[in-house]
Image (cartoon, rainbow, N blue to C red):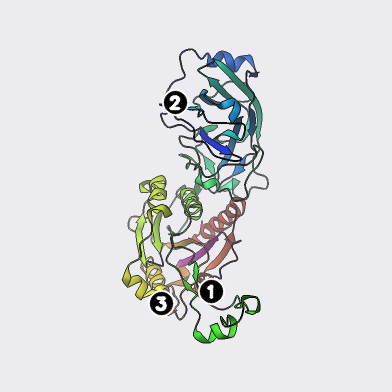
Amino acid sequence: MRPTRPIPALLLLVVSLLVTVGAQEKPKHEEPPPEVPLAQWLAAGDHMDFRAEFKVMKPRLTYQQRLLVECRATISGEIARGRDFHMWMKVADRSGAWLPGHDYTHSAGAGALTRSNEMQMVAGFYAQPGQYTVAIIIYDAGTHQYDIRHLPLTVEALKNDSLAAQSATDEPAVEFLEQPPPAGDTFEHIADLSPRQTDSEWQFSKYGAILPLAATRRPLQIDVVLDFTDHGEVEKTDTEDELRSYNDRRLPPWERRERPRGLRAEQAVVRGPAEYIADLLAIGHTLAKLQPANGCVRFSGIDMTAMNAGFRRVAPDKMDWEELRKAQTPAKGGGVSVAALKNRKEQPLFLRDFLKGLEAPIDSCGSSAVAPLHAVLFVSHRFLFPRGSHKEPFRAANPADYRLFYWQLNEGNREHGDDLESYLKSSEAQVHGFEEPHRFREILAHTLAEIVTAAGK
């Protein structure tokens, strides 16, 4: 395990019922203050000098196919006011031995905090199935008071796991995270889990399930295509006739008829949300663990609105998932060229030509006297082509050597139709929709079994 890190992995939030008052951050310390007998406190059991609440959330599967454990603590602003807090999270195994490493941060409560505020702390780690004890320690250096709570944790193995026979692992029992989730992922009550929370916005694991693929008669060449295109947020551009028929502005608002859902709207040029990008890259992180015994895996990234490929056929060990997430964040702003806007009806042709280019064999990717089996895993959300687009379907030159899979991420978003599904189905693609990590795991297991069988054992 890595030693204590300079980047805090405990997230400190100040939440106000009436007004928010920021925390006064002090310089971070890589080691506990010398007066803190951490080992002694851990061995002595629970202790409370000031009131705080603690919670360990139920482990949950992420798109990285890792089990995430989120830990929380809250302190009333009235208690936290003016205190100089040092906070740790430690984890012990079934035998009670404390595992190497911990999460640590140092922060102070602002002098203006009141009972209308509370300080919230969030930490997390990835864990293998097993029995653990989580200890959360909060120490006030000003008064030398401290709280410590030992909380039991059971991390259960996945039930009816369709991927278990196809995966191995290089994971440690516990992987502490160097960074907290985004500060916007606050919670209202210590036991709450927001349904909008996206676990993929936690730091990506440095490990993950290894997915070895058995030796096959034909080399297995796998292209993973990650689609960074925005959903195509609608911008009402009805024709004059449609406006008269469905949204007559001469009528008072309560008498206007709403436009039927089936009518098209143009796409707005807006970057995709951070949550989608995070989920997409977490899936890519998982697929980077594919290890064909005879063959290879390559990654490409496209944006159909801009009609360009940000990267093509990059080897898994060259992918930096955290840096890619930073580069794709919506805060950066996604520029689209004038030419792309002018020629947006050519988006299906761009996709066709891109897929056509992926038919070329990958150099130094497996060996055999017979032709390789080429599998393309296309990961995207629903997307609408502009009205009147030029749709010429992609046709594989050698269908017997080619498999196309469209994995429709966030299938539950029904606000948009999906031209990709009908377009790729016309190219003999298999379409699988999912909106949570367990279903993705099932689809992954099914797809891997299918392509290994097709390549011949």
Q: Earlier in the sequence, mark 1 or mark 2?
A: 2
Residue ID at (52%, 34%): 12
Pointer 2 local density, CA inside 10 Å: few below 14, some 14–19, many at least 20: some
- Residue 241 vertical position relative to residue 86 in the rendered view, above or below: below
Pointer 1 local density, CA inside 10 Å: few below 14, some 14–19, many at least 20: few
Q: Position of residue 189 (x, y in %)?
A: 65, 39
Q: CA distance from mark 3 to mark 2?
A: 53 Å
**Is residue 68 within the magenta segment?**
no
Kind of element beneath mark 3: helix
In terms of depth relative to the viewer, which is nearer, 445 or 127?
A: 127
**Is residue 414 within the magenta segment?**
yes
Q: CA distance from mark 3 to mark 1?
A: 17 Å
Mark toward the viewer: 3 or 1: 3
Residue 313 shown left or right of residue 61 in the figure: left
In terms of depth relative to the viewer, which is nearer, 355 or 84?
A: 84
The range drawn in magenta is 402-417
Pointer 3 local density, CA inside 10 Å: few below 14, some 14–19, many at least 20: some
Kind of element beneath mark 2: loop
Judging by the rendered image, the residue that carries numbered circle 1 is 422
Q: Earlier in the sequence, mark 3 or mark 1?
A: 3
Residue ID at (55%, 42%): 66
Judging by the rendered image, the residue that carries numbered circle 2 is 4
Q: Earlier in the sequence, mark 3 or mark 2?
A: 2
Judging by the rendered image, the residue that carries numbered circle 3 is 345
Residue occupying the far bottom of the picture: 241
Dots 1, 2 in contact, CB < 8 A: no
Residue ID at (48%, 67%): 232
Callout 2 amino acid: Thr
Mark toward the viewer: 1 or 2: 2
Callout 3 amino acid: Lys
Kind of element beneath mark 1: helix
